[in-house]
Image (cartoon, helix red, strand yellow):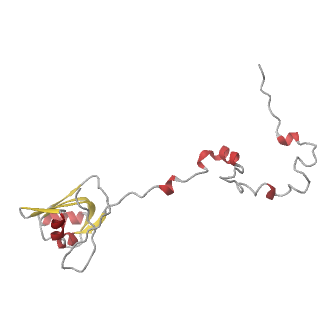
Amino acid sequence: MTMKVKKRRKSKRFRGSHTHGRGGKKKARGSGHRGGVGMAGTGKRADQRKTLVLNLFGNKYFGKTPTLRRKPSPKPQDINIRNIVEGIDSFVKKGIAKENKGVYEINLKDYKILSVGDATIKMNIEAAAASKSAIDKVKKAGGEIIISKTPVITKTPVEVSSKAPAKKVVVVAKR
C-alpha cells in the first residue's frame, strides 16, 4: 500500500533560488509578468488562469448569460373599441366576426381591448385582456367581453377598411 505524500508548495521549493525559475532577476518584477492585477488576464479561450477562475466562481463565470438570451414574454396588442366598430364589416368578411341575431361575436384572442371610442353596436368580444372602462362601455351597449386565459400571439397583420382615415390594425385570424 502506497501512502499519499503531500507535495511541497512551489514557493517553498524555490527558497534559496536566486530567480525562482524565471530566468533573469529583472524579468518577473512587475504585475505585467502575471498579465495584470487581480482578474486581469483571465481568458476563456486560451486557458490563462482558468483553473483559478473556476475554483473561485465555478462554471458560471464563463459562457453565455441566460438573462440576455431569454426572449421577452409576448404581450397582447392593443385595439380600441372605435377600431372594432369602424372595422366590423372587414372583420365579418375575413371571418374574425360573425353576426347572430343583431349581436356580433368577435374573436380577438390576441388583443387587449381599450376604451377609446363608443360601442354603438352589440358585440360579444373574446379577448386576451380588456380595460375596465372598455368592459363597461361594451356592457352598456348590450354586449360583453370574455377574457380568455391563454392568448395565442401570432404576427399576421390584417388591415381594417373603413371610412375613417387609414389606420393599420393588426388582427389575428381564427385558427
Q: Position of residue 118 (x, y in %)?
A: 18, 72
Q: Quadrant of the N terminus?
A: top right
Judge whether 5 appears above or below 79 on screen: above
Residue 141 versus residue 157: which sits nearer the camera?
157
Q: Position of residue 55 (x, y in %)?
A: 67, 43
Residue 87 versus residue 126: which sits nearer the camera?
87
**Which residue does the image show at 20% across and 69% down from the upper left?**
84
Q: Position of residue 106 (x, y in %)?
A: 18, 62
Q: Position of residue 23 (x, y in %)?
A: 90, 51
Numbered label tally: 0
**Which residue does the image show at 94% across and 43% down from the upper left?**
16
In the image, taking residue 64 as reference, residue 16 lies left or right, namely right
In the image, taking residue 47 as reference, residue 113 lies left or right, namely left
Q: Quadrant of the C terminus?
A: bottom left
**Which residue does the image show at 65% across and 45% down from the upper left?**
54
Judge whether 3 appears above or below 107 on screen: above
Please indicate, yes or no, whether residue 82 appears anywhere in the rendered image.
yes
In the image, taking residue 142 as reference, residue 153 lies left or right, namely right
Quadrant housing residue 102: bottom left
In the image, taking residue 27 as reference, residue 85 lies left or right, namely left
Q: Residue furthest top?
A: 1
**Which residue does the image show at 71% across and 49% down from the upper left?**
49
Q: Residue furthest left?
A: 101
Quadrant housing residue 96: bottom left
